[in-house]
């Protein structure tokens, strides 16, 4: 009997949705028929993003929050390119082109590129060369948390302002307080400006008195990461447009999952929807249930991630 030729599955994005989709695919027998390659922009294994606040506060170590360390990928015969960004997809020849020059062919492609922090228009935010000013931070990745900790622990850094009105702002503030800083959370960002250059010396807020601070954290929402999909000619509105099978509109073999995906007009910013999406996606990728459909997530419990983790491989 001829050996079965495996299909090549490429996953772009090793965040919570990408890795969850891979776990679901393995749980549904995907390793038998699929050669899986994962590209992840971040130079780590896969970690629980919802616990970054606890890393910032020192309650969790970095090791505590890993779901699938690099060794997990090796043990499951998954090729992981960690720290490698995919720049473009050629959907006609079925190739992905990565930042390290690598070109990989796929039979099926999953895009799970998540979101990036929204940077509001704000005077003083950028240096003349266009980089974000030293002392200003976003809060999305493990590297963001690491950078904030290193910065906050300097002797002369004593006060921080966190801009943002949601639980992410509260988590950032709580973490920085635990690092010994005096922290104020400001929800109104309109007309705000960063004062000073290097170091920054404070913020001005349109209707209130200026605040002195040495550090600013911006948690003003996030936007689906669709740049790759746009340059690759995929259907994009607010997010990458998918159907009830998580298949990208007008594409046969390209799927999107997680915060980068737009389903029935909705984009989601929490874990529960992407867990449900990953399960349906895996049904279709493995062929285990061709009738499986994602119809949207209606109730999103507050801070739901802790109770929903890991059906198969994760902690
Ligand atoms: C601090 C914090 C706390 C949170 N707390 C909660 C909570 O309590 N409850 C809850 O439900 N949700 C919470 N969330 C939201 C939750 O973490 C997200 O909904 C979830 O991580 C989204 O998963 P994702 O895979 O779509 O995106 P991400 O987890 O952001 O993963 C996307 C990955 O793709 C990578 N990537 C992007 N572009 C490319 C490319 N071109 N090539 C290769 N890789 C690429 C990125 O680097 C990233 O690693 C929190 C988020 C943060 C930041």
Image (cartoon, helix red, strand yellow):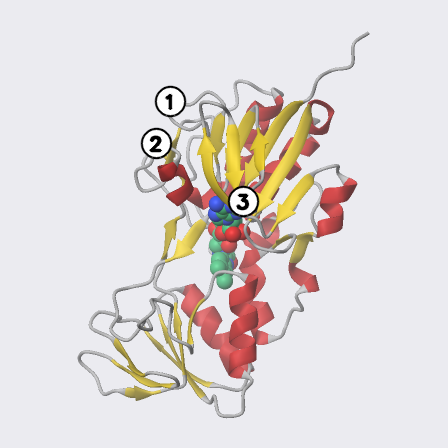
SS at mark 1?
Answer: loop
Q: Quadrant of the N terminus?
A: top right
Look at mark 1 in the image and give the residue it sits on: 250
Q: Position of residue 2 (x, y in %)?
A: 78, 9
**Residue at coordinates 33% horizontally, 73% vertically from top-left?**
127
Q: In the picture shown, does residue 161 fall above or below 34?
A: below
In the picture, the disc for residue 235 is 2
Query: Which of the 4 image quarters holds residue 190?
Result: bottom left
Residue at the farthest right position = 1
Q: Is mark 3 within 8 Å of ligand 1?
A: yes
Q: Is mark 1 within 8 Å of ligand 1?
A: no
Q: Position of residue 93 (x, y in %)?
A: 49, 23
Q: Position of residue 110 (x, y in %)?
A: 52, 34
Residue 237 versus residue 96: which sits nearer the camera?
96
**For residue 263, side relative to residue 105 (left or right):** left
Residue 313 versus residue 80: which sits nearer the camera?
80
Q: Position of residue 94 (x, y in %)?
A: 51, 25
Query: Which of the 4 image quarters holds residue 218?
Result: bottom left
Q: In the picture shown, does residue 78 fall above or below 114?
A: above
Alpha carbon separation for disc pair 2 and 3:
18 Å
Q: Does the CB distance between marks 1 and 2 fall below 8 Å? A: yes
Q: In the picture shown, does residue 201 fall above or below 145?
A: below
Residue 60 versus residue 229: which sits nearer the camera?
229
**Residue at coordinates 49% horizontally, 86% vertically from top-left?**
181
Look at mark 3 in the image and give the residue it sits on: 13
Near mark 2 (Cα within 10 A), the count class, few <14, some 14-19 or many ≥20, is: some
SS at mark 3?
Answer: loop
Q: Sequence order check: which comes first, mark 2 or mark 3?
A: 3
**For residue 293, side relative to residue 102 (left or right):** left
Q: Does the CB distance between marks 1 and 3 fall below 8 Å? A: no
SS at mark 2?
Answer: loop
């Amino acid at each position: 009997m001829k050996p079965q030729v495996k299909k090549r599955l490429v996953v772009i994005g090793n965040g919570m949705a990408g890795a969850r989709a891979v776990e679901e695919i393995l749980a549904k027998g995907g390793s038998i028929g699929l050669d899986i390659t994962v590209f992840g922009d971040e130079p780590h294994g896969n970690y629980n993003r919802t616990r970054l606040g606890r890393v910032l506060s020192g309650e969790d170590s970095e090791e505590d929050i890993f779901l699938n360390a690099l060794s997990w990928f090796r043990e499951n015969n998954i090729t992981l390119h960690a720290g490698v960004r995919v720049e473009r997809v050629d959907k006609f020849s079925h190739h992905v082109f990565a930042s390290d020059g690598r070109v990989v062919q796929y039979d099926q492609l999953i895009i799970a590129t998540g979101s990036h922090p929204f940077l509001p228009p704000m005077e003083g935010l950028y240096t003349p060369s266009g980089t974000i000013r030293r002392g200003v931070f976003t809060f999305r990745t493990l590297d963001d948390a690491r950078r904030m900790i290193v910065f906050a622990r300097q002797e002369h850094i004593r006060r921080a302002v966190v801009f943002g009105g949601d639980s992410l702002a509260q988590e950032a503030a709580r973490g920085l307080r635990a690092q010994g800083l005096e922290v104020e959370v400001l929800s109104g960002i309109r007309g705000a400006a960063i004062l000073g250059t290097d170091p920054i010396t404070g913020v001005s807020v349109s209707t209130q008195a200026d605040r002195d601070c040495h550090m600013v954290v911006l948690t003003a929402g996030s936007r689906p990461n669709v740049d790759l999909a746009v340059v690759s000619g995929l259907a994009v509105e607010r997010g990458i447009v998918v159907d009830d099978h998580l298949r990208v509109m007008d594409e046969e073999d390209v799927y999107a999952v997680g915060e980068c995906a737009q389903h029935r007009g909705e984009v989601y910013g929490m874990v529960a929807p992407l867990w449900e999406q990953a399960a349906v996606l895996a049904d279709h990728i493995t062929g285990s249930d061709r009738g499986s459909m994602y119809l949207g997530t209606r109730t999103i419990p507050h801070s739901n991630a802790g109770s929903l983790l890991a059906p198969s491989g994760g902690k």
